[in-house]
Amino acid sequence: MRTEIKQILKNTRVIILFVFLLLAIISIHPSPNNTGVIIKSVVKNGPANLAGVPNPKPQATPLSKEVIQVINNININDEQDYYQVISGLVEGQSVSLKTNKNIYTLNLVNTTPDNILGLLVNKAPKTNIRKGLDLQGGTRVLLAPEEKVDVQDMGFLIDNMKQRLNIYGLSDIVVRQVSDSPGILGGGNQYILVEIAGANEEEVRELIASQGKFEAKIANKTVFKGGQDISHVCRTAQCSGLDQRRPCQPTNQGWLCGFFFEVTLTPESAKRQADITKDLSIILSESNDEILNETLVFFLDGEIVTELNIVAELKGKATTSVAITGASTGVNREEALTNTLNEMKQLQTVLVTGSLPVKLEILKTDNLSPILGEEFLNNALLIGFLSILTVALVIFLRYRKIEVSVPVVVTMLSEIVILLGLAALIGWNLDLAAIAGIIIAAGTGVDHQIVITDETLKGLGGIYLNWKQKLKRAFSIIMAAYFTTVVAMIPLTFAGAGLLKGFAFTTIMGTTIGVLITRPAFAEIISILLKK
């Protein structure tokens, strides 16, 4: 047996499997001793927000989010400790909040009884695997535009909704377009799926049911409103992009890059701009450019989105062509470039749409409790464990060989670990549909391993062909089954308005990992062990 183990460990396909397993574990980053509560979201204008507690970035991995460890010198180990401590806090009190990244002092002024700190929290994660709403709780809303919109307008609509939800302090957000058919030729009904963790149904309805209001002000006077005073926003390379007059350059905080794009105002809004700016003073900016002493401030639903300097040449001029400029920073040049272009795109989207371009109808709302989600997860883990034990027992009873049953179970677990590592790496949210996909992928893997084992045993027994030819035949059967599965799963990506996308995606990725990585390794292992 020692000789066989050495052969297995030196086999190229087995080494590839080990490498992917190691990368998956690094991606998952298991941290069983992680304690405290993570900050899921920071309520706009709440005590935590005013104290400088940052809202988690939408794409932040679970383990990278801030973890509350101590409140007023009391250790916080879990949600029960957190809620027990804040239940004793009162209006006007000063609170010391220590996280794994910083220490904050919160003044409890104008608080709400149901959220005195202005924080939405959850228990500290043990891995980087993201859980969908089915498993962590939140609200899922299915919306339909009241009229048909083209691809570009749908993109503007989704970007606008993300912008608005982010402004209101919600971080765990998914906004995507779905349909009830593939729509290869443009057919199918259009829908928008919004998933928000940590928000209740009433909050979500209030944020997304109305079309919203965008306006730009100078010296607190309205110059123009989005969607009605802007006739054109340039989004092409000819009149938008990185500002060559302000190329990317290093600063004390990292790198700074500038952007610009042109907008065309209506004559009425151009005249308002001239009337407002004619009495303003000209000053020098930090880069020694001549600008006006008031900025152009953009508001969305009454909240400030951004503010920009106004070049001195626009003073008192009723010009309809205006160049909008801005800048963004990053740790390095590449990050600064990415942040600058993203900020430009968001600003263009807000200017183009102003309010949402079409009115949305709420078709369906699902409000899921975190307690129920945890119960779903525990049940799924229990069923998965029992399934693995059952498979191991059935395989052993079928072949009566430990050399077969152990590799089958190890390979099945390897597929699951690599699939979870991929999900953690790309930020894929695991929900109940995705868990069902994992089970299907693992079950398909066991079927394929049985085919490989049977063909190998026949080959070793001298029946029909030698064992290498038998393995080739086994893999031809497996590849045919694989392509059949993929073809069957693709339509499910769009079925049910895309709500089964997690199931389809996970099944496709799981079977692909099996065909390319784990099953070739299993075939080598089983052939080495059975040849003796």
Image (cartoon, rainbow, N blue to C red):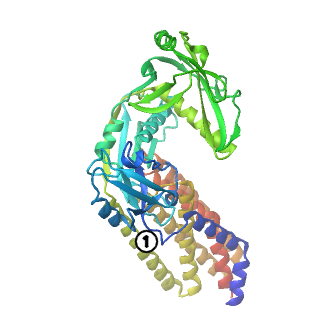
Residue at 39% of width from left, 54% of height from top?
A: 133
Residue farthest toward the bottom in the current orientation of the protein: 1
Where does the image place residue 408, in percent across and percent down from the top left? 56, 77
Where does the image place residue 52, in percent across and percent down from the top left? 46, 47
At label 1, the amino acid type is Gly
Q: Is residue 196 left or right of residue 275?
A: left
Could you tell me which quadrant the N terminus lies in?
bottom right
Q: Is residue 300 left or right of residue 278?
A: left
Does 49 sit above or below residue 435?
above
Could you tell me which quadrant the C terminus lies in?
bottom right
Does 357 sit above or below residue 340?
above
Does 5 sit above or below residue 73?
below
Q: Is residue 360 left or right of residue 100?
A: left
Where does the image place residue 48, in percent across and percent down from the top left? 40, 49
Closer to the camera in the image, 17 or 179: 17
Q: Secondary structure at mark 1?
A: helix
- Residue 467 image-quadrant placement: bottom right
Closer to the camera in the image, 16 or 41: 41
Dot 1, crowdedness within 10 Å: few (<14), some or many (≥20)?
some
Closer to the camera in the image, 250 or 348: 250
Where does the image place residue 152, in percent across and percent down from the top left? 52, 30
Identify residue for label 1: 384
Residue at 50% of width from left, 65% of height from top?
A: 127
Q: How many marks?
A: 1
Residue at 67% of width from left, 23% of height from top?
A: 238
The answer to whether residue 465 is seen in the rendering is: no
Closer to the camera in the image, 19 or 213: 213
The answer to whether residue 439 is seen in the rendering is: yes
